[in-house]
Amino acid sequence: MGVILLYSMLAVCGVLCVALIRRYDLHDREPWWAVLLAVALGAVAMFIAGRTQVWILSAGGSWAARNFNLLMAICAGVTEEAAKALVVVMLAVVCRSIFNDPLDGLIFGALAGLGAALEESVVFLLHEQRAGVLPGTEPVRLMGHLVMGGISGFGFGSLARVGRSSPATLARWWIPVGLGLGIGLHVLWDIVAFDAGDLGRMLAWHTASGMGLMAAGFVTFGLFVRIAHSRSPGAAQDQGSPASIA
């Protein structure tokens, strides 16, 4: 019964996160099959990223063992955010008919991040053999991956097609900017988390750094929503003018 309750709570958190993401998809909401596909692909991508991290750390030998926290933080940030971005690219290529808005990079990146978080949570909970209640870290994990996935995927909204052949009104240079910010936030977050985990408690700088990174992530996510929405065909129609090329 406890295990059922645990995963039911995790599923509820996931559903609430999806509802939050779809709230930003104002003009051309993605079909549910595409939402579920993005979440599922995010989970698969996270599994592959995890196996890649194990391989890299194993290949590092004694040097990796001596610098485990830093190397793990870098590996996790790079592989996991790159995996989420790859999901967005796959959807942009395969699902051309629905990847038709500059906001879709952020939307699908966030959904891939949610899938990644769910996969990581399940692995963690099975490993720890926890049951009965959802640990307090899990909502943070879900929202963190969601936000960072959206940031990393934002620039790939430039791959969208707002018409039959016209490119999206989002500059391609946003791709490295968004992905770089997503990776940077992820690496810094893990450095703080791993250090606190080693100590078994949160020091003042852990709390301050964590709060600062959370704030930076949410502000960046919100800014990217505004940028993408301002270049959306739907926003241009609302204003009674065509979208401008950025």
Image (cartoon, grey):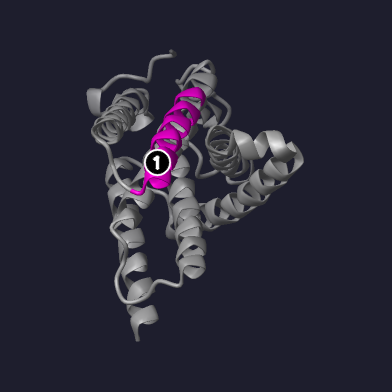
- Judge whether 37 appears above or below 62 on screen: below
Give the quarter of the image for residue 192.
top left
Determine if the magenta segment contains residue 94.
no
Q: Which residue is mark 1?
A: 193
Residue 77 placement, left or right of 60? left
Q: Which residues are magenta?
A: 180-200
- Judge whether 109 appears above or below 227 on screen: below
Which amino acid is tagged 1?
Ala
Secondary structure predominantly adopted by residues drawn in magenta:
helix
- Judge whether 238 appears above or below 19 on screen: above
Q: Is residue 102 visible?
A: no
Residue 204 placement, left or right of 104? left
Report the front residue among 237 and 136: 136
Determine if the magenta segment contains residue 197.
yes
Q: Position of residue 112 (x, y in %)?
A: 49, 48
Residue drawn 51% across the image and 52% down it: 38
